[in-house]
Amino acid sequence: MVAPEDLADLLADPYRVACPNGHTALKPATTTPSAYCRTCHESYHANELVDRRVDSCKPYRNGNG
Ligand SMILES: [Zn+2]
């Protein structure tokens, strides 16, 4: 789920938030903490959306070794 107060910020990145079916590029609603999925033709509340936070397990390496 996505915190309603964070939704607008997260939707600024089109690949950050996914609908419950895994689609991205959601369209934020202006009046409610929700977003519209053009693929599903459905609107989802922040609680239903998925934060696809890039959380790499790999340590970052500077340069090519
Ligand atoms: Zn969808």
Image (cartoon, rainbow, N blue to C red):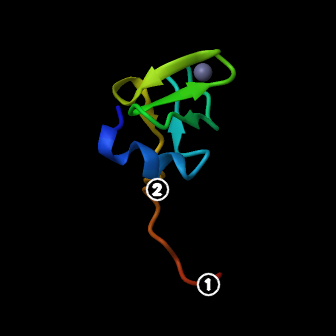
Q: Residue at x 38, y 30 (%)?
A: 46
Q: Which mark is residue 18?
A: none
At which x and y percent is residue 59?
Answer: 44, 68
Rendering quadrant holding ligand 1: top right
- The image quadrant that residue 40 belongs to is top right
Q: Secondary structure at mark 1?
A: loop
Q: Secondary structure at mark 2?
A: loop
At which x and y percent is residue 7?
Answer: 41, 43
Question: 54 and 49: which one is in front?
Answer: 49
At which x and y percent is residue 5?
Answer: 31, 45
For mark 2, does the 10 Å Cα neighbourhood hold few (<14), some (14 to 19), or many (20 or more) residues?
Answer: few
At which x and y percent is residue 49?
Answer: 43, 29
Is there a contact, CB below 8 Å, between mark 2 and mark 1?
Answer: no
Q: Residue at x 39, y 23 (%)?
A: 48
Mark 1 C-beta closer than 8 Å to ligand 1: no
In the image, residue 17 sits, relative to residue 54, either above or below, namely above
Question: 8 and 30: which one is in front?
Answer: 30
Mark 2 C-beta closer than 8 Å to ligand 1: no
Which amino acid type is marked by label 1? Gly
For mark 1, does the 10 Å Cα neighbourhood hold few (<14), some (14 to 19), or many (20 or more) residues?
Answer: few
Q: Which of the image's four quarters has the N terminus?
A: top left
Please state if 24 lies on the left or on the right of 6 as rendered: right
Which amino acid type is marked by label 2? Ser
- The image quadrant that residue 45 belongs to is top left
Q: Which mark is residue 56?
A: 2
Please state if 46 lies on the left or on the right of 58 as rendered: left
Q: Which of the image's four quarters has the C terminus?
A: bottom right
Q: Residue at x 60, y 45 (%)?
A: 15
Q: Which mark sits nearer the N-terminus, 2 or 1?
A: 2
Question: 57 and 32: which one is in front?
Answer: 32
Location of mark 1 (residue): 63
